[in-house]
Image: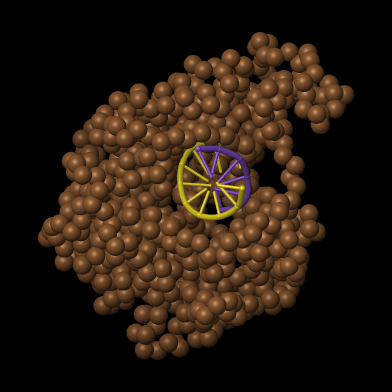
Chain colours: A brown, B yellow, C purple
Amino acid sequence: MDNSDGEMEEDESEWKACFVDSAAVCPSTSVAATSGSIIKTPESVHRVILHFDLDCFYAQVEMIRNPALRDVPLGIQQKYIIVTCNYVARERGVTKLMSVTDAKEKCPELVLVKGEDLTHYREMSYKVTEVLMSYCPLVERLGFDENFVDVTEMVEQRLARTSEPNSFSFKGHVFNHLSADAKASRHPRLAMGSHIAAELREAIHSKLGLTGCAGVATNKLLAKLVSGTFKPNQQTVLLQENIGDIMGCLSGLRKVPGVGHQTARRLQALGLVSVKDLQVYPVNDLSREFGGPTAQRLKNLALGIDESAVTPTGAPQSLSDEDSFKKMCSVKEVVEKIQELLSSLVGRMHTDGRQPQTFRLTIRRYSATNKWFSRESRQCPIPGSVGQKIISGSPEDAASLLVPLAMKLFHKMVECGAAFHLTLINVCFSNLQSRGPAVSGKGAITSFFTQSASPRKSQISSSQNRDSSTQNADGCLLGRQVSACSRIAPPKGQVTSKGACSSEEPLHGFKWEQSCVCAVEENHDEASCSTERIDLDESRAPPNVDPEVFKLLPEEIRKELLSPAYSKSPSGQSASEAPRMSENELRENDSATKASVKRRRSAGINAIDGGDVTEQEELSLPRSSDSDFPGNVDPEVFSELPPDVQKDLLLEWKQQKPVLKAPSSRKPGKGSAAKGRDRKAEGRSGQSNNLFKYFKPA
DNA sequence: CAGGGTCTAT
DNA sequence: ATAGACC
């Protein structure tokens, strides 16, 4: 989620104030790189892309779960940092990725909620994607709190039905334009896009109770850049004539989505620091360092050009679980941690229903030097029988079979017997194989009719095939959905409605119906597609819940309150259940949280600067005694280092770990032009029927 | 930096 | 099969 990378983010002030300048580097229509016979000019077709970014996502989720947190400064804590915080906390100086100690210093009243378990965030995240998908199938997720939506087709359809295309305006802000001075009639598609964006934001708010920002532009890069212009809960449109402005105002290349740390450093080595530097740098020179394709892509990004398609995200390609810690150096601890991670992961895998073919174990060793990246991993195929247990057998059963497997991989990396110091362990299932109906003709839309009953967990002995069987009662409904989807099918054809119209699990059927109905309606009447098509009968509130209050709750919450599971155990955990409304509960929760805050307050301080100092390391570690340093290490310099750093360096060397690779430049490396263009699409579409579980967790 | 993910290059 | 790089 808030993975922006520290700096980024929150610098709305940055280009918000750049109403000047504008070298008008307006690449409005990229000249078709007529390299071949295809004459299409991607950017000239003017797509309308939306980018949605939820406001302080984790904090919002926690405030929904416990409304009492709404009015207090709230910080979501993962280990010893505040990954995000609500706006009350921001007013008091707390920022994202601030250490807990700094945050408490700035705001002593800060209430902290642990956010290491991502379950609730993951679930809510998929609900958001689902809402967006109910309007348009072309939705691509980016992390847990961002989504791109290609609404080009929807815009065209609406425009075609609009009688007076001249009488409407932009919804929300228009980048670099003061209020309503922008003439929507000159940008009908973007204007229409802004209305759709507003509708979708409203849908997300009314159905899930979440607020967020949206950006409207002609490509993903621009949509993402512009969406954060006006921060909490607002939206902004970027007109083609302002592309130069928005790009030119970025404070550095790092601010360009797609340019990470490494890339930025390599560019810097070439003397490129600002976006403008890159805009005017000769592509040929750039190619020498990055290779043709990458060079062109980088330069395009600097110019605000981005042809990449909005690729519908399907069900995840892998499921992983990890935990980081300050120090782990015994095999026993490792086994226990792996056991813990595995049982949780196996549970998720079980819910998913697909059978993983590959297992991977990743570790991060403590390193005094370049701490950040540097993870090592080993993977191996999962014996079919084991994979079976994960899905059908008892989770505990499968986990016990996987632990030995994990340990085997572990020993491939860590030469046990020698000391080691790990700071993270990750377990991951990938190569997820769908059982159930095979997607026959790749992408053939017909595959959507082939589903029958629960595609997973059920028997199905012959793992393969199993298509065209029955077309149950829902057949016609699905059929209509398909036609609706296909009508708005984008270039990538087949991929389009992946995920949609699949699974028919009883549990989820309800949801799909909604989507289908929506899609169909969409084709008949734009207006009806706005917000209220779900008839979650607002009938009556559950006993002991004020009907008035009930009506005001977001749809999702109402559903939960009405669900049988909810009324079942009235007690439950204070934190892990649906939101409570009773004042008693709120108070309890509040004080409980505060108590934990206090506890952590003192503990946190140790954790922070204590780090390597407090622990009087067990000295059983390799004595620095001798010489075997890597050749490039000056013994003099080495001896000046703090003892613990010396120790760790020695450890690293002994584990023959290449610690610091020269961040040198790389060789071009022939860029193969075109490749397996659809691998992505194919793979994903094959899993479409599983996507559903992510949208509506049991 | 936390906990997830995705994709690409070797 | 692994390491990166990015979000």
- Residue A86 is situated, as x and y percent measured from the top left of the image, at 52, 47
Query: For the C terminus of chain A, which image quadrant?
Result: top left
* Residue closer to the observer: A76 or A571: A76
Residue at image position (43%, 29%) is: A341
Q: Quadrant of residue B8?
A: bottom right
Asked if residue A685 can be seen in this view, the reply is: yes
Residue A104, image x and y in percent? 61, 35
Task: Measuring from the top left, give residue A110's x and y in whole percent.
Answer: 55, 37
Q: Quadrant of residue A13?
A: bottom right
- Report the side of A451 relative to A26 (left or right): left
The correct choice, above or below, for A69 with respect to A477 in the image is above
Does any portion of residue A599 appear in the rendered image? no
The picture quadrant where one finds residue A336 is: top left
Q: Nearer the viewer, residue A403 or A514?
A: A403
Task: State the residue at coordinates (73%, 67%).
Answer: A284
Seen in the image, is A135 located left or right of residue A97? left
**Residue A447 x %, y %:** 25, 61
Front residue of A36/A688: it is: A36
> Compared to A320, does B6 lie above or below?
below
Q: Is residue A565 above or below residue A404?
A: below
